[in-house]
Amino acid sequence: MTVPKVKVDLGGISNSEFWTSPAVLSLGIIAIASLFFLKLVGSGAKPPHGIPHHKTGIPVLGNLLAYAKDPYKYLKSAQAEHGGKFFHNLVMIRGTMLLGADMNKFLLDRKEDTLSFRNSVFLALSKIASRAYIDNTKIWLTNMKGTLRPETFRKHCEIMTEQAQKSLTDWEKTPEIEVFSAVSTLVQKIVTRCFLGEDFLEHHFDELLAIVLCLDRDAVCVPSLLLPDWVPHPAARRLWAASKRFDEIFEERWKERVRTGWKEDDHVAFTMNNPEVANIKHIVPTYLLVMMWVAHISIVPSISWTIIELLNSPTHLSQLKTHLDENFPQNSATQNSGIFYDSNNRIPPFLHATLRETLRMYPLITIRRLATSSVTLPGTSTVFPKGTMVQISPFLTHRNPDIYPNPEKWEPERFIEDGGDTLIRKLNADGKIAYLPFGGGMHKCPGEKFSMALACTIVGMLVRDYTIQWPEDVSGSVQDKETKKKERAEALKKLNFRPLGAVWCASRINISVKQR
């Protein structure tokens, strides 16, 4: 995905002058040397009692190199060697990995004062979010629940439908589109309209998209994860500039709203008028920026993978198309929350099963929590000291053959009964959590309903109203089709495991979209 540039004000000096200045060079050398010294000393940190220490390859860097190459293979190998619990040092992160549905339940049910969600998130957001933002996470999560008010949710569903219609028409005008990039732009337009407002979309969308893509590229890159927050390396400076520019855009729009007597009751107005936010309004831009980023790293891949899997499974694609044609004919009037909701305001089972199977196949590789006090692992003498990073892996859970038969195969049928509600209740019962695309327990994602409605709208409209194909199926010889099919099969095996967010494809995947 091409990342548009965000303008950076260097105060009158050029990039080369800044980076070759003695002060910056000296600061950089001292910072990097100090950092690696601390990391190397820390590499000998002992695992909690009863937890084996996983080591592979060369000293210090072996685990990191293996994890960076293929996190899934690395975790499966460590699990085969040690079982469901092991300590590992990835240089950037040292902690204990807990694998299994029972361990998922243990971690996700812990309260904030034991295993902290917000402190683990701060490690990734510290370049753009202040400590004050993290400390007020509870207020932001409560505020976001305002989007679930019936009248607000209906309005958001209307925006989803309207924007999807516009964007899908644009997709049709291009011979082929790159699916992840196209979905990203569409999702961000919808998120901008729903959570910031029409004025932000009209005046600043290209810049807002550039800022989100800057976060996606730079917030969790190696220098950002390795170096202290105050070191002005290129990625950090881009992040600072992006965050500053977002603040400026917000201030500009808000002042204009005040000047013109803006009456729209959108999420920005709801947030700024929330009494709990009265003393922290200066942090509202960060709250909105994080929401846009979270939508990008989670909703975009789930929609993109659903489109890809449907194209790879013509039978499922045909069945879904028939189901939508029969139950939700094009241009039919709807009085429900969303265009593809039934009379009981529920997503129809076949579409729901399709989306839920994609969420099973491509979830986060890990979920982290930081111990804010000593925590004992139930039934053992193992104690996680304060400051310990504890992790679980939704990806390994969702691809466990003891839980899901044929786990590497995309099979929506497993969720077909009532859209998967019964199966998910069974998977997440008896002291276990085995289906967790939106987390679970104390910190289940409050954006689940919005995310599912958005995915339902985009996938549903695309399948019902358009013909989607691989580009070579539109025009190409039989030999060309077979060659492209083999190349794409290899490309789709190359997954991009993000430190945060769901799994992306490391290759560009193009599709063709035409009106039916």
Image (cartoon, helix red, strand yellow):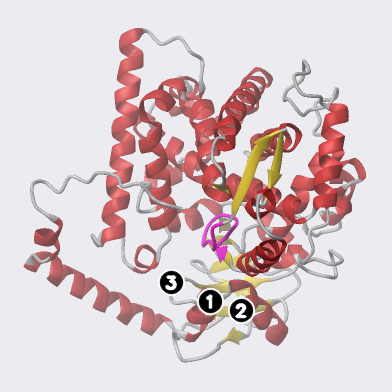
Region in magenta: 496-508
* Callout 2–callout 3 Cβ contact below 8 Å: no
**Residue at point 48% right, 13% down?**
264
Classed neighbour count for the residue bearing mark 1: other residues with Cα under 10 Å, few (<14), some (14–19), many (≥20):
few
Mark 1–mark 2 CB contact (< 8 Å): yes
**Residue placed at 75% from the left, 50% from the top?**
310
Relative to 476, is 430 on the left or the right? right
Q: Name the residue under label 1.
A: 69
Which three-letter amino acid code belongs to the residue tagged 2?
Tyr
| The C terminus sits in image quarter | top right
- Residue marked by disc 3: 92
Disc 2 versus disc 3: nearer the observer: 2
Q: Can residue 443 be seen in this view?
A: no
Type of the residue with mark 3 = Met
Q: Does the magenta stretch include residue 404?
A: no
**For marks 1 and 2 on the same chain, the one whose residue lies earlier in the sequence:** 1
Please name which of the two marks, 1 or 2, marks the residue nearer to the observer.
1
> Circle 3 — which element?
loop
Q: Quadrant of residue 78?
A: bottom right
Q: Do the residues labelled 3 and 1 touch (CB within 8 Å)?
A: no
Inter-mark Cα distance, 3 to 1: 15 Å
Cα separation between marks 2 and 3: 16 Å
Report the residue marked by disc 2: 74
Q: Which residue sits at x=31%, y=16%?
A: 256
Whole-number angstrom distance, CA of label 1 to CA of label 2: 8 Å
Residue at 64% over, 40% down:
513
**Residue 189 percent coordinates (x, y):** 50, 32
Image disc number at residue 114:
none
